[in-house]
Amino acid sequence: MTFLPQFVDPTAAMPLWMQFLLLGFFVNLVFSVADIASVGIASLALERLKGRGTGSVLPRACGTILIGLGMALASHHA
C-alpha cells in the first residue's frame, strides 16, 4: 500500500478506490508474471546444470561465494 499512493490522482475523474483497485491489480499481475518467468528460467537452468555432472561443484561454489561475502561483510564492519 505504500507504493501505490504516489500514482493516485485525487483530482482525477475516477474515484480513489477505483484507482487503487486498478493499480493494485496491474502491479500484482506484472509481478506475478515476472515471478513465474523467473521460476521457469531457474528451472531450465537447474535442469541444464544437473545434466552436466556438476552436482558437487555447484553447492561448493555457492558456499564459497557465501563465505566470501560473509568475510567481506565482517571485515567491513570490524
Image (cartoon, rainbow, N blue to C red):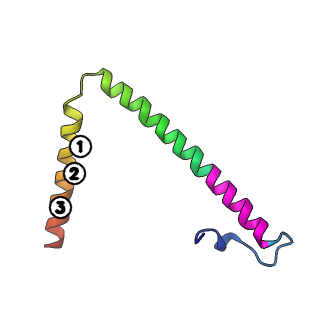
- Can you say whether 11 is above or below 18 in the image? below
Q: Which quadrant does the C terminus fall into?
A: bottom left
Q: Secondary structure at mark 2?
A: helix
Circle 1 — which element?
helix
Closer to the chain start, of discs 3 and 2, is 2
CA gap, disc 3 to disc 2? Answer: 10 Å
Residue at mark 3: 72
Front position among marks 1 and 3: 1
The residue shown at (75%, 66%) is: 19
Horizontal and vertical percent for residue 12? 82, 73
Q: Quadrant of residue 1?
A: bottom right
Q: Is residue 51 left or right of residue 24?
A: left
Magenta segment's dominant SS is: helix
Q: Which mark is residue 66?
A: 2
**Vertical relation: 69 (above or below) 53:** below
Q: Provide residue 49's location: percent of width, then percent of height.
A: 32, 28
